Image (cartoon, rainbow, N blue to C red):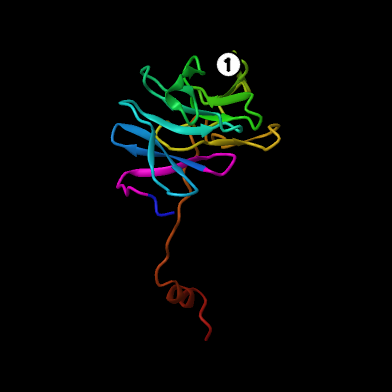
Amino acid sequence: MGLEPESNNIQYPSSISADGTHFVFDEQMRGDSTIYMVPLRGERRVTSLIATMFDERNSQLSGDDRWIACQSNESGRDEVYVRPFPGVDGGRSQVSTGGGRQPLWAPNSRELSDVDPDGRIVAVPIQLSPGFSAGSPRAIVDRPLVLGLTGIPGRMYDVSRDGQRFLIIKAGGDGDQPAPSPQIVVVQNWFQELKRLAPTN
């Protein structure tokens, strides 16, 4: 898209507005992350959306394009916060209560999910009228399912368009330990080895 300015930092996409007019991405720097926005129509000038001295990442726009959720470590641990969009300075509400990351809006914007410190997905009911308010979180599953590593950008789960099903990366291996990564074995000079093992004579 020819975005400016160019950066040597890690940048990764996080959300596109439902009306297709804005693209939101996170830039990961040493010690923190910043959330940027760029319009997809007209002059595509990158602007800083949420930039503080803390680590804000994994931003997600609500389905009605009125709110943006992200995780921030400003309290000393990752929690999920919601701000109005695009006027992010118009207020801020904490949604998670015991730690949270990787927020995800339900398609109808009436529920916000996140991953708790134990790797479980929890859902929080959201009320948008007359003002924003969050209800009590409830665990969708009663055991850890998500490899929600804090150092990995992006979400490890998603929700279907009808809001009825989750697609989840499940922890493998023994207990909470992930399964070993697959290995690739490279065999050099395999044709000569094949001729040695299966001579044609």
In percent of the image, x 48 and y 24: which residue is there?
Answer: 83
Residue 29 shows in the view: yes
Read off the magenta span: 4-21
Quadrant in the rendering for residue 108: top right
In percent of width and height, residue 68 lies at 50, 29
Residue 8 against residue 141 in the figure, above or below: below
Position of residue 180 in the picture relative to residue 104 (left or right): left
Q: Residue furthest front?
A: 42
Crowding around mark 1 (Cα neighbors within 10 Å: few <14, some 14 to 19, many 20+) is few
| Residue 72 within the magenta-colored segment of the rendering | no
Residue 147 shows in the view: no
What residue is disc 1 on? 131
Mark 1 is on which residue type? Gly
Residue 180 against residue 72 in the figure, above or below: below
In percent of width and height, residue 153 lies at 43, 38
In percent of the image, x 32 and y 31: which residue is there?
Answer: 32
In percent of width and height, residue 136 lies at 59, 13
**Helix, strand or loop for the magenta stretch, by majority:** loop
| Residue 16 within the magenta-colored segment of the rendering | yes
